[in-house]
Image: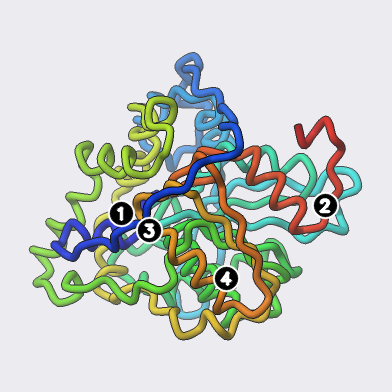
């Protein structure tokens, strides 16, 4: 869930100082994180590691059980990419609503949307997709192929063309925001509306990682899956740490790093120097909603105002009592704002 800027911090490049937070005016919406019963291995797809049975949060367990592989042929790749995703078809009356497509952050997975996904699926076709090289998506090359931003975009386009085929409301969180900007500006015909959630967009590249010798760089990548780093990112991500920065949240964040292709695929992305979309922000043509946690300690909230200034047709909404991950910390509020943005009528009982 942490952005690539967080990884830059590990390499000695300081993060931008965040400005003092303003007082909150809206109540925190609590999310149940009560442990569920231990799930059997057979209840999950075979591509999950054994550790999936240790997940406790009901939303995480349910989301993992729904996750499946979709064979996705991509031009230039020898074999189809097995795209991991969670999908929910349009409910009754929802066929005229643009599907929601949810893109996770840096080195994360679709499980990041475990709390928001079911809320959106009540009213619209909804997809949470693992980007090429992360989550549980498997390109069948043991991670040694191309996992650059361009490759991630080509994969996402092929998946969109095969499985969705109509303009979507594209939601990108953290580095997923950079991926969403990249996709929306290169394939505007695919995106009806754009949503940026505490998005990375003005931090260019990944710094010294791309210049490191492979063994050194690979060692740095492997640090990403350690419990101590995941816990640090977990603590930084939330405003309400006592409720959300749990051991189980760390388990969810680590799960995809146990995939055999993960380290090499992540290294390939690092060596590509990552996303560079700052100059394209002003060229975004889609109506855009910028959502930003008032207490974000990973990316400076000043970036939110910059997005609002540079994107021609944009609206900025602050998420109070929220850190870097509104979809995890304030999913009810985010659901309401997304429905409003997408012009989906919501009965008072649903919005409460």
Q: Are marks 4 and 2 in contact (CB under 8 Å)?
A: no
Q: Are marks 1 and 2 in contact (CB under 8 Å)?
A: no
* 105 vs 128, nearest the viewer: 105
The quadrant of the rendering that contains the C terminus is top right
* 13 vs 21, nearest the viewer: 21
Q: Earlier in the sequence, mark 4 or mark 2?
A: 4
Q: Position of residue 31 (x, y in %)?
A: 56, 27
- Mark 4–mark 1 distance (CA, rounded to whole Å): 35 Å
Seen at 69% across and 62% down, the residue is: 169
Q: Earlier in the sequence, mark 4 or mark 1?
A: 1
Residue 319, labelled with which disc? none
Q: Position of residue 165 (x, y in %)?
A: 73, 68
Badge 3 crowding class, 10 Å Cα cut-off, few under 14, some 14 to 19, many 20 or more, is many
Query: Is residue 78 in view from this perspective?
Result: no
Q: Are marks 4 and 3 in contact (CB under 8 Å)?
A: no
Q: Earlier in the sequence, mark 3 or mark 1?
A: 1
Residue depth check, mark 4 versus mark 1: number of the one nearer the observer: 4
Residue 308, labelled with which disc? 4
Looking at the image, residue 181 sits to the left or right of residue 88; the answer is left
Query: Dot 3 corresponds to which residue?
Result: 299
- Residue 134 drawn above or below residue 248: below
Query: Dot 2 corresponds to which residue?
Result: 344
Query: Dot 1 corresponds to which residue?
Result: 262
Q: Quadrant of residue 122?
A: top right
- Mark 4–mark 3 distance (CA, rounded to whole Å): 15 Å
């Amino acid at each position: 869930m942490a952005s690539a800027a967080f990884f830059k911090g590990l390499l000695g490049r300081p993060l931008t100082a965040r400005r003092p937070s303003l007082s909150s005016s809206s109540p925190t919406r609590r999310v149940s994180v009560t442990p569920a019963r231990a799930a059997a291995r057979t209840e999950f797809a075979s591509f999950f590691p054994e550790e999936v049975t240790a997940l406790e949060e009901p939303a995480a367990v349910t989301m993992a059980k729904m996750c499946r592989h979709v064979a996705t042929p991509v031009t230039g790749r020898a074999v189809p990419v097995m795209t991991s995703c969670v999908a929910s078809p349009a409910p009754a009356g929802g066929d005229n609503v643009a599907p929601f497509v949810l893109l996770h952050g840096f080195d994360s997975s679709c499980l990041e949307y475990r709390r928001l996904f079911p809320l959106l699926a009540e009213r619209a076709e909804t997809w949470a997709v693992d980007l090429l090289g992360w989550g549980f998506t498997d390109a069948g090359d043991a991670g040694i192929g191309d996992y650059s931003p361009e490759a991630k975009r080509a994969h996402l386009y092929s998946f969109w063309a095969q499985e969705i085929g109509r303009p979507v409301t594209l939601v990108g969180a953290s580095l997923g925001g950079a991926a969403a900007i990249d996709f929306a500006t290169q394939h505007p015909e695919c995106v009806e509306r754009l949503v940026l959630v505490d998005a990375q967009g003005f931090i260019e590249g990944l710094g010294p990682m791309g210049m490191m010798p492979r063994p050194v760089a690979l060692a740095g990548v492997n640090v990403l899956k350690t419990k101590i780093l995941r816990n640090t990112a977990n603590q930084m991500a939330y405003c309400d740490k006592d409720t959300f920065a749990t051991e189980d949240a760390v388990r969810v964040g680590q799960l995809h790093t146990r995939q055999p292709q993960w380290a090499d695929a992540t290294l390939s992305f690092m060596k590509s120097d990552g996303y560079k979309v700052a100059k394209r922000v002003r060229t975004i043509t889609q109506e855009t909603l910028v959502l930003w946690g008032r207490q974000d300690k990973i990316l400076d909230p000043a970036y939110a105002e910059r997005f609002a200034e540079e994107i021609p047709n944009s609206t900025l909404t602050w998420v109070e009592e929220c850190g870097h991950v509104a979809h995890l910390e304030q999913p009810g509020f985010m659901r309401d704002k997304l429905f409003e943005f997408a012009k989906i009528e919501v009965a008072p009982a649903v919005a409460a």
